Image (spheres, rainbow, N blue to C red):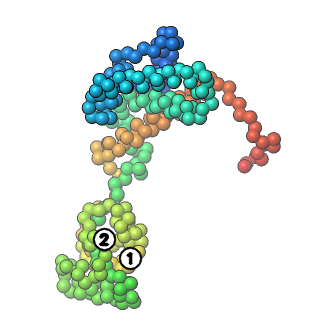
Amino acid sequence: MSKWLKEPLIHFLLLGAVIFVAYAQLAGKGGAPDEIFISRGQQENLLNTFGRTWQRPPTPEEFQGLLKDYVRQEIAYRESRAMGLDQEDIVIRRRLRQKLELLAEDIASLAAPTDQDLQTYLDAHAEDFVVEPRLTLRQVYFSRDRRGADAEQDALQLLQRISSDGPEGEFEQFGDPLPLPSEMREVRESEIARLFGSVFTDGLQGLETGRWVGPVESGFGLHLVFIEARESGRHPQLPEVREAVQREWLSLRRREAVDGLYDRLAVTYTIEIESLLDVPFPAGR
């Protein structure tokens, strides 16, 4: 069944049936043009809409108001069409286009993707789902604004002290205050770049783990850095990113359904675009 639902011809036939039914409903279900019939289903829809909005059922007076508003809406719709007010109205044209495309997208979403569908999509768009590198690190900050030309020398002196005392001390106390974390655990590289800037993350590339190094430049100043652990970026397996892959797969299917709908419908029209200029555009422009 799911195989049939993926066929473009089936989409086209389903969409045609939906449009036909919708047109019949808008035409008043085949009744007299001056007859307005409010079915039980339409009334239940009014009740449900009110309940979702206000989190309670309407009172009898409110329900009568809903019915009155529905009748007025139907009268306004029919009279406006009779007067031709819907013709050449860009807002109405856009709204109708939107509804047509939503129908096509809904039909394209009927068939759930198989594991093979998702794996094929993941293989074709692997770079969109790369798991970023993650770092666990500590940093000690030295402000050039506070220390001036001594900032780098102070950082190197602390680095020398660390080499003799060992890496486990509370060395952050020897730095300057900075409203950013002195310790980060399993943080994405992009998040570190957002906090400290790309110059800082570029300076972390290739640094040895398990020892204090630096100074490393950032937009704030200088830093001594201790990289405790580094997890390299990698391409994930499907179970890790299934939800994201399925979301993107469905988005692609919807776009393809809309494009395919217009391609199939366009062949039934003769499309002529009148030249805007008396002189045609030069070749290659």
Label 2 CA crowd tier, 10 Å (few <14, some 14–19, many 20+): few
Please state which of residues 221 and 66 is positioned toward the viewer in this rendering: 66
Q: Is 164 located above or below residue 26 in the figure?
A: below
Report which quarter residue 214 is drawn in: bottom left
Label 1 CA crowd tier, 10 Å (few <14, some 14–19, many 20+): some
* Kind of residue indicated by mark 1: Phe
Q: Which residue is mark 2?
A: 180
Q: Is 116 located above or below residue 184 in the figure?
A: above
Name the spot of residue 171 as percent of width and height, x first.
Answer: 22, 80
Residue placed at 46% from the left, 23% from the top?
Answer: 72
Q: Which tag, 1 or 2, sits closer to the chain's start?
A: 2
User: Regarding mark 1 in the picture, which secondary structure is present there?
Assistant: loop
Distance from disc 1 to disc 2, alpha carbons, whole Å, reads 11 Å
Q: Is residue 236 left or right of residue 106?
A: left
Residue placed farthest to the right in the image? 278
Q: Is 25 located above or below residue 190 in the figure?
A: above
Name the spot of residue 111 as percent of width and height, x first.
Answer: 37, 28
Is residue 120 at least partly visible in the picture? no
User: Regarding mark 2 in the picture, which secondary structure is present there?
Assistant: loop
Q: Quadrant of the N terminus?
A: top left
Name the spot of residue 25 as percent of width and height, x first.
Answer: 46, 17
Q: Which residue is mark 1?
A: 220
Q: Are marks 1 and 2 in contact (CB under 8 Å)?
A: yes
Name the spot of residue 158 as percent of width and height, x first.
Answer: 27, 86
Q: Is residue 107 left or right of residue 275?
A: left
Report which quarter residue 65 is drawn in: top left
Is residue 207 at least partly visible in the picture? yes
* Kind of residue indicated by mark 2: Leu
Q: Is residue 252 left or right of residue 130?
A: right
